[in-house]
Image: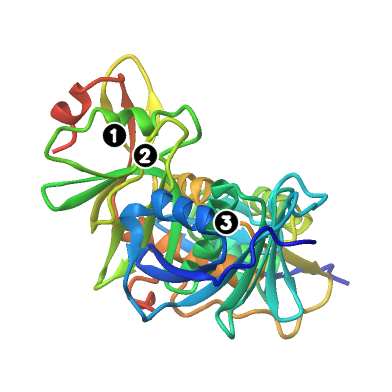
Amino acid sequence: MKNNLYVARSPSVSARRMGDEIVVMSAPNSTLFTLNEVASLIWEAADGVTPVDQIVADKICSSFDVEPQVALLDAKAVVRNLATHGVLTVSDRPILGASKLPENSAAQAGGFRERS
Amino acid sequence: MKPIATARPRSLVVEVSNLPIRLWCADPKFARSIEERYSGFLSSSSDVIGEFTIELTMPGVKCRHEDVRVTWDTNEWLIERADFQARWNPSTARGRIQQGASIYSLDSVLRIVNTLVLARKGGFLLHASSAIRNGYAFLFTGVSGAGKTTIVRFAPPDASVLSDDISCAIYRRGCFNAIGTPFHSERGLPGENLGAPIKTLYLLAKGPKNKIEAIKDTAAVRGLLENILFFVSDPELVKLVFDAACEFVSRVPVRRLTFVPGTLVWADLLV
C-alpha cells in the first residue's frame, strides 16, 4: 500500500507572497519564516487533500530541473521542518477542513483597507 | 493603596498618532508634568478615542514583572510593569492607570495603548526616527545604537523632525503616512506633531561610506517587523500587524542605508 503524506496550512499563521517567496508569521509566538521558491509552492499547494508526492510532481518537477525522488525527499524534509514549527500540519490521511488559501494571498494589493 | 492626592481631577487630552486620549489627573503637580512632557501633543479635541483616570499611588504599584506584560483579562487589557498597572477596556474606551509619580510610567502606558489601537486602524509604532523634507517623510529604523538619533540630529534645517526614536506609520488616504510622536530617546527631544506621506523607510547600518542598497521584500518585511513595537500575542492583532507590515512593504520603498555619521548623508543621498 502506498504511504501517502498529506499537508495542510496551519490556521494560526498568516502568510503573504512577495515575489518568489512567501513570508509566514506564526501568530501564537510571532515567529517569522521566509519560504523560498520551492517551499512557497509546497505551502500554496498544502490543501490537506493533495498528497505530497503529487504536489512534488505537479508543482516542483514541472517547474524545476530536478530528479523526482530527490525533489520528494527535499519536499518531505521541508514539510517536516515546517511542521515542527507549527506552520504546517502533516498526516498520513487527508486533512479535512484545512485552511483555505486566501484568494488574495498571492497579491494582496488592494486588499488592505483604510480603517476608521 | 492610599492615593497621594484627592483634589478634583483635571482633564488633559494628549493626542499621539492622531489618536486623542483624555487623561484625568487629580494631582496638580503631575498634571503639570503631563503638560510639559506632551506640550506639542496636547489637544483641545472633545472627540477622544478613550479616557484614562490616573491614580498616583504611594509608593507605587508593586508588580512582580520587571518587563512590561500585556494580557487580556475578562473584558479589558491589563498592562503591567514594576512601576505601573493599567487597565483598558476597548469596548467602553475607558481605563485606569495606577502608577508612581513618574512621567515615564505614563509614557509607557500611552505607547502600549497606542499600539493596541493602531493595530486595528492599519498602523503601528516603529522604533524609528523620522523627518519630513520637501513634503515627504523619511523613516530610519534599527536597534538601539544603529544611528536613529544621529541621523535626524544631522538633518538639514529645512527638515522637520518627527521623532528620534519612535515614529507612527499609518495607512491613510491611499498611502502610508508618518506622524510625529512625543516619544524620544534619552538624549533627544520630542518630535513635531506633524504628518506626511512616507517616501522611504531605511534600515540603518553604520559603515565606512554612505550607500543605499535595495533589499528583497521578504527581508524588508522581516526588518520592519523586528522594529515594530508590539506587546501582545493576541492572534487577531498579530495578524493585523503582520498584514500592515506586508502592505507597507508593498507600497513604500524599503532600503538598507549604510552611513557615516555626519551631514553628508542627507546631502548625498536623501533628497
Task: Residue B141: give x, y in percent of width and height.
Answer: 40, 41
Label 1 chain ID = B
Q: Earlier in the sequence, mark 1 or mark 3?
A: 1
Q: Is residue A106 visible?
A: no
Horizontal arrangement in the rendering, residue B242 relative to residue B44 (left or right):
right
Q: Earlier in the sequence, mark 1 or mark 2?
A: 1
Q: Amino acid at mark 3?
A: Phe
Task: Residue B86: give x, y in percent of width and height.
Answer: 67, 64
Q: Amino acid at mark 2?
A: Asp
Q: Which residue is mark 3?
A: B230
Mark number for residue B163? Answer: none
Q: Earlier in the sequence, mark 2 or mark 3?
A: 2
**Circle 1 sits in a helix, a strand or a loop, which is it?**
helix
Residue at 45% across, 36% down: B185
**Circle 2 sits in a helix, a strand or a loop, which is it?**
loop
Q: Which residue is mark 1?
A: B152
Out of B98 and B209, give the one closest to the viewer.
Answer: B98
Residue B110 versus residue B191 in the image, above or below: below
Say few, some or many: other residues with alpha carbon within 10 Å of mark 1 (under 14 / 14 to 19 / 20 or more). many
Residue B74 versus residue B176 in the image, above or below: below
Circle 1/circle 2 CB separation < 8 Å:
yes
Q: Which residue is mark 2?
A: B164
Label 3 chain ID = B
For the N terminus of chain B, give its image quadrant. Answer: bottom right
Q: Is residue B141 visible?
A: yes
Q: Which of the 4 image quadrants contains residue B187?
A: top left
State which mark lies toward you, 1 or 3: 1
Q: Name, please, the residue furthest toward the top.
A: B208
